[in-house]
Image (cartoon, coloured by chain):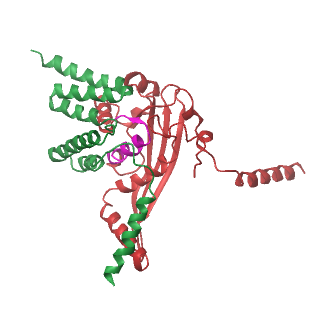
Chain colours: A red, B green
Amino acid sequence: MRRFYTLCLLFLVTMLSACAPPINKITAFPHMYEDGRPITVMMLPPINHTTAADAKELYATTVPVPVTNHGFYLYPTSVVFDLMKQDGIFDTEILKDVPPRVFRDKFGADAILVVEIEQWDTSYFILGGNVTVALNMSMRSTGTGEEVWSRKVKVVVDTSGGDGGGGIAGLVVKLAVAAVQTATTDYVPIARMANDKAIAAMPYGKRHPMFDKDRLEELM
Amino acid sequence: MNKLVYLPLGVTILLSGCAMGPPPLYYWGNVPSTYHRMVLEPGDKSLLEHEQALKDSIRYSEEHGKLVPPGVHCELGYMQFKKGVMAEALNHYDAEVRLYPESKVFVDRLKDKVKEAQSHAKP
């Protein structure tokens, strides 16, 4: 009998959570609206879980524009990478043992941006191919060590160049496919799309006109 | 028939412009492309193009009353430092801190490297 009631409760909870309202920014990321919220951000060399050797450096080229336009002071990634290489901590195996506090004390960063590149590849199927970039992004306070923001994002682009239909729609799809196909020796345009998706879910930084005014903005 | 295709395409492009939000905070110009190229094809040519793109971003920003994007002066300064042009490196570092006081600790670290290089250079 008890088991029956437990199952009923579980069922009820599951049904109710499906009816839950979409979450807003302040509910998802409360630390981003508290004192000590990050103003300066340092992106660490990404953790590369893929076999693409150049993914880290290529990915880094896509970060400054969206993050700074979102209102954060992001340290120039090429300079940061150079400094890390000189200090012998560019390799993420070593980097992950460095406490966040170090980046605050030595470089004045309020937060570190930690990105894991989960997928950075092209997969082929019979009639075409997919290019995929999947990222796991996390912002961590260097003061408290806590994670203040995170997002997982995946963008898959079908490059099979299939028939997009006739007329204008077909023309635009074919142009887009051609553009992506010529760029598929690297995945930067797709990484940019992935960043845009992820950063849309980030609270605005200090320099953005909407700073602190986006608390109730709903996350998709 | 072919020419008629361009009219709705043109309208679509125009209307999609109307759907966009307020302009971005900063003018980055070609910087992401030149940065990308530097990673794909490292060398003097791509380095020079990137330097040019950073300078263009500064010029455009100043001409249009926008703040130079975060890190641009910093990166230019660092490029001068690597070439051994220390005075110009320091000028860019100072510009970065003027525009972005929050960058002070980071820029101080970069200035330390200039001092270090200068002290080694002394006979």
Q: Position of residue A188 (x, y in %)?
A: 35, 53
Q: Please name whichever residue, A98 or A197, is drawn nearer the observer in this view of the structure.
A: A197
Q: Position of residue B89 (x, y in %)?
A: 21, 28
**Which of the 4 image quarters holds residue A57?**
top left
The answer to whether B69 is drawn above or below residue B34 in the figure is above
Q: Is B2 on the left-hand or right-hand side of A115?
A: left
Q: Is residue B54 magenta?
A: no
Residue visible at 30% across and 48% down? B32
**Which of the 4 image quarters holds residue A176?**
bottom left
Q: Is residue A70 magenta?
A: yes
Residue visible at 32% across and 82% down? B2
Farthest residue in the bottom direction?
A: B1
Residue visible at 36% across and 29% down? B100
Magenta region: A57-75
Quarter of the image for the C terminus of chain B: give it: top left
Q: Please name whichever residue, A7 or B23, is drawn nearer the observer in this view of the structure.
A: B23
Farthest residue in the left direction?
A: B123
Quarter of the image for the N terminus of chain B: give it: bottom left
The answer to whether B40 is drawn above or below residue A212 in the figure is below
Q: Position of residue A55 (x, y in %)?
A: 35, 49
Residue visible at 51% across and 30% down? A37
